Image (tube, helix red, strand yellow):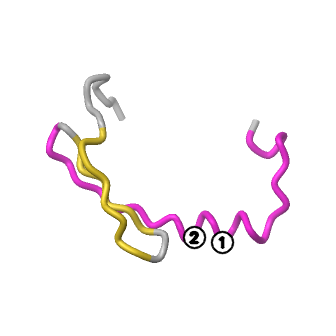
Amino acid sequence: MNIPENVRIKKDTYLGDYAIRFAFTDGHVSDIDFHPFLSAAARTQLTVSTWM
């Protein structure tokens, strides 16, 4: 995937229950649900080495 450097987040909207809608300067809109990621993180002890 090649993302142009000039594409930025134009607007973000909280949708509720850890979901956020992002509108980008190129017209693309994406909804991201962070709940699965946050739930997994809560069940796993995170350390610095986990992220490296």
Q: Callout 1, which amino acid?
A: Ser
Is 16 situated left or right of 48 in this image? Answer: left
Q: Is residue 20 left or right of residue 18?
A: left
Please tell me which residue is depicted at 60% across the width and 63% down the height of the picture: 37
Q: Position of residue 1 (x, y in %)?
A: 36, 35
Residue type at mark 2: give it: Pro
Expressed as whole percent of the image width and height from the top left, the position of residue 38 reads 63, 66
Q: Which residues are magenta?
A: 26-51
Give the residue displayed 57% in from the left and 70% down from the top. 36
Q: Residue at the far left: name it.
A: 27
- Left or right: residue 25 compared with residue 18: left
Q: Which residue is mark 2?
A: 36
User: CB atoms at circles 2 and 1 under 8 Å apart?
Assistant: yes
Residue 48 occupies quadrant: top right
Where in the figure is residue 49, as x and y percent of width and height? 84, 40
Residue for badge 1:
39
